[in-house]
Every structure is written in C-alpha cells, then in structure tokens.
Amino acid sequence: MLKGKSAIITGSTSGIGRGIATMLAREGADVMINGFGDKAEIEALRQELAKLCGGTCLYSPADMMKPAEIKDMVDQAESAFGSVDIVVNNAGIQFVAPIEEFPVDKWDAIIAINMNAAFHTIRHTLSGMKARGWGRIINLASAHSLVASPYKSAYVTAKHGLVGMTKTVALECAQDGVTVNAISPGYVMTPLVAGQIPDTARARGISEEDVIQNVMLARQPTKRFISIEEVADTAKFLCSSAANSITGANISIDGGWTAA
Ligand code: NAD
C-alpha cells in the first residue's frame, strides 16, 4: 500500500513508535527510525525494517528536544528518500509529580519532546507534502489529550496542545491532499508506562499492583491494556485512501476511557 512513499517515525526505537515503523515498513514504505537506545539493537532493528520494506531504512539519533537536530533528521530523510510523505510524531516522555514539586527541567523536556518537536517536524515537511499533493501527519497524543489525571500536569498540557496543533494544521492544508490527525491511546504496556508505575505508586502512596489495577485499568472499561498493534493498525488506516477525508480528528483507542 505504501510502496514509493517514505516516512519518519520519531521515537521508534521502542514501544508504539517501533510498532508503527514496523507496520509502515511492512506496507512497503521507506522508513527513518529515530530515538535512543542500545546501538547494536537499533542497528538490528534498522536492518530488519530494511528487509521488511524491501527498500531503505535509515536511523537518525536526533534529539527531539533540539530543533537543529530535528532539521538535520528531515534533511537526511529528504536527501535519501527524495521526499518525506508521512510523519509520525511519536517520541514522548512522562514524569509524574504534584505540580508544586514538578522539576522545571522535566516540565521543559516534556513540553519540548511531546509537543514542540511536532511543530518542528511539521514546519520542515509540510510544504513538500503540499507541493506533491499527498501527505500524512499523525500525532501520537493520548487519552490525556482529552481528560486529565493528577500529577501529570506537563504531559496533559503537552498532549492537549498537540491536539490543538493537529486541528490547526489540518485546516491549513485541508485542500492540499495532506491529512493531519491525532491518535489518542489509553494505557499501552510499553517501557514508558512500566516506568511510571513506581513513581505513581510513590506519589499516591499505594502499591505498584494497585497502580495497575486501581489507577490505570480502573480508567479503561475494557479492563485490559491497548496493544501496540491496535495503535499501529490505526496509523496504517490513516495512511490509506479510506482515510482521505479524515483530517483534524483525534481518534481515541482507549477501551472506553473517555466515554465515561
Ligand atoms: P516508549 O518509552 O516505549 O518509547 C518512547 C520513544 O521515544 C523511544 O524510542 C525513545 O528513545 C524516544 N525518545 C524519548 N526521548 C526522546 C528524544 N529526546 N528524542 C528522540 N527520541 C526520544 O514510549 P511509548 O509508550 O511507546 O510512547 C510513545 C508515544 O505514545 C508517546 O508520545 C506517548 O506519550 C504516547 N502514548 C503512550 C501511551 C502508553 O500507554 N504507552 C498511551 C498514550 C500515548
């Protein structure tokens, strides 16, 4: 379905981003992966995805906190692939603390990576998509783009902002064949979620098992974690022609969380 197209997926060395990069490669897109991690594991992933897409898979170590590195990543993809047709703004971090104790550097990092990075990838890729008359921008938001939870002020702020950006850019390129959408999952068991269990337990003064059952899954009427594949399939759908008229949307995959 995506042969001849090329994609950048930020934060794709792990979790949801890795799942989406794998899905887009399986559909034939050339992919640029990005994110941090063990060098050998990233190289193994790059080779696996190159084989899967039957084309090119590149890795960019760009730090999504650094606008100049984001520009370098886009330039590198454009010169290797000839275009960037799909951008998945997925890189994200989390930190959990009451706002009076929220470390300023954590606040700044969450806003930079989870929100500002999308501004930079979009501003460097949108004119090319418009000129070619086709493009897909997919922003990984969260159920926390629609509702709040205590102790997640920076994350909730960034995700609400990211959805505002999604709607605005969708309007700016509505007649250019470029769609801009957000995907808002509930809890998906990835390293990002596993990592916040001990912090939430500490902040709330409860056990880690209580965090899973009574904080995380308590919010999801289906009482199960969302799978990475369910999120990746939605990204694939948004890249298909069936989704040509879906733009400016915020698609919930949250087991009913935000219906309550
Ligand atoms: P993860 O921790 O498994 O992966 C995050 C990725 O981002 C990694 O590849 C990491 O290296 C990369 N990254 C972190 N900081 C970076 C930086 N400065 N520059 C470049 N890359 C960086 O997380 P995940 O759970 O797969 O989350 C992916 C996205 O989905 C995030 O935006 C997150 O907010 C969102 N999300 C996750 C869940 C969930 O339950 N896991 C739910 C809703 C939304």
Image (cartoon, rainbow, N blue to C red):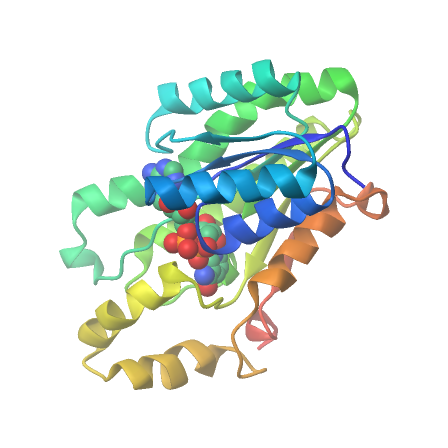
Horizontal and vertical percent for residue 212? 37, 80
Dividing the picture into quarters, in which one does residue 31 lie? top right
Residue 8 percent coordinates (x, y): 56, 33
Residue 236 as seen in the image, left or right of residue 99: right
Whether 253 is drawn above or below 255: the answer is above
Q: Is residue 14 left or right of residue 108?
A: right
Q: Nearer the viewer, residue 49 or 211?
A: 49
Give the image location of residue 52, x and y in percent: 66, 43
Report x, y in % for residue 111: 35, 41
Q: Quadrant of the C terminus?
A: bottom right
Q: Residue at x 14, y 57 (%)?
A: 101
Residue lying furthest right: 242
Work out whether residue 114 can be spotted. Answer: no
Image-based side of 219 in relation to 98, left or right: right
Which of 208/146 is in front? 208
Q: Is residue 70 above or below residue 28?
A: above
Up the image or down, 260 lies above or below 68; here it is below
Name above or below for residue 39 compared with residue 155. Answer: above
Image point 38% across, 65% down: which residue?
Answer: 193
Query: Is residue 105 left or right of 141 when viewed as pictured?
Result: left
